[in-house]
Image (cartoon, rainbow, N blue to C red):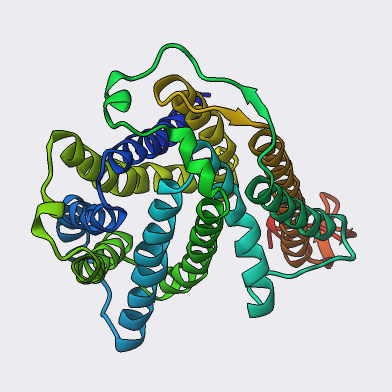
Amino acid sequence: MGEDLLAFVVMVIVQLGFAGMLIITKLVMDGGMNPFVQCAYRPIFATISIAPFAFFLERKTRPKMTRSILFQIFLCSVFGITANQYAYFIGLNNSTPTVASALDNLIPAFTFLIAVPLGVEKLGLRSIAGQAKFGGTIICVGGAMLLSLYHGKVVIGQLGFHWKYAESTGKDVNSAHSNFFLGPFLLIMASLTYAIWLIIQGRVSEKYVAPYTCITLICLMASIESVIIGFCVVPKLSEWTLNPIRAISVVYNGVVCTSFAYFLSSWCIEKKGPLYVSMFNPLLLVISAFLSWTLLREKLYLGVVVGSIIVVAGLYGFLWGQKMETSAEDIEVNKEKKQSTNLQVDLELQLPNSNGHLIELKQISSEAKDVEL
């Protein structure tokens, strides 16, 4: 009971951390910080914060690095951080935290669509679980399209109370909807690149069992890639200066939303499984929508509300099918183990009784562990 409660609290903290990232990142970009500069700083602070763990915890157990593994880690840095963060932050700059958190729920659907052609996952349309996963994927994508293409009327208006600093930026968070197609499109691309990273990272984790070293190398490579791209797009050094709120943003994003969140999520995956962790994704939508409404005075539109509900419904349909499939596989594995351990023993023993006569004992179909010879 205590461990279940702790896992629940940990995942709520993780989602709160991500919601804070959405709010503060949106705030500093509305205040003039270039998304390319934001993307360059984040992996640098992530590398600094996680490198000591890799050095002290894995220096004796770290496996040998090969060229193949190093290349796959490079691909992880490209898709998992560099391309993902550029698409995500530029999309967030042209959208709102609520839309960004809603479209994050597309990641399981995209992962499934990529994994099927590669043979990592089976489509399995003949089973109820396969139909639920496929149907949930289609519903997720449909909800994302509705959220991206349909604006609609205001469902919940602005709140009178808001963060005074947000007002000082001089930009209304709702004005991002003037480019409501570009923002959601880039956020969808961010979910797609993250799904690609999940597939590649799965292969790397099987061959290179050193998670802290792996994530350190990924962040280090992404730092180099992002700084090069950032200086090519934003060559003025004045754009790279960090005032207090910008410094808080990049340090928070690197330390809390990369290193800290990675540690907590990994612990929950170990204790409760990946399905349990993914079930908390929609919580980010609720928290970020509330914080954005209260602190940034975001308006909630009909298209965003309906699209978000459809995306979350599709996500839970997909996760339900995945859970059924996993349970069926576990039952099949346990059945095979039981059959292999349940040996058909036909013993015919002759033992003398007290009168010296032989009696015949016959035991049929006994379990091997219950038989003593």
> What residue appears at the point 44 percent right and 68 percent down from the top-left corner?
201
Query: What is the quadrant of residue 365 in the picture?
Result: bottom right
Residue placed farthest to the bottom in the image?
67
Query: What is the quadrant of residue 171 in the picture?
Result: top left
The image shows residue 161 at horizontal and vertical percentages of: 41, 12
321 lies above or below 96: below
Camera-side residue of 65 and 91:
91
Give left or right: position of 234 versus 310: left
Camera-side residue of 230 and 359:
230
Question: Quadrant where the C terminus lies?
Answer: bottom right
Give left or right: position of 302 versus 234: right
Query: What is the quadrant of residue 10 in the picture?
Result: top left
The image shows residue 291 at horizontal and vertical percentages of: 45, 25
Give left or right: position of 306 versus 219: right
Residue 284 visible at all: yes
Camera-side residue of 289 and 57:
289
The image shows residue 39 at horizontal and vertical percentages of: 28, 56
Residue 370 visible at all: no
120 lies above or below 97: below
Residue placed farthest to the top in the image?
160
The image shows residue 329 at horizontal and vertical percentages of: 74, 59
> What residue appears at the point 71 percent right and 48 percent down from the top-left corner?
146
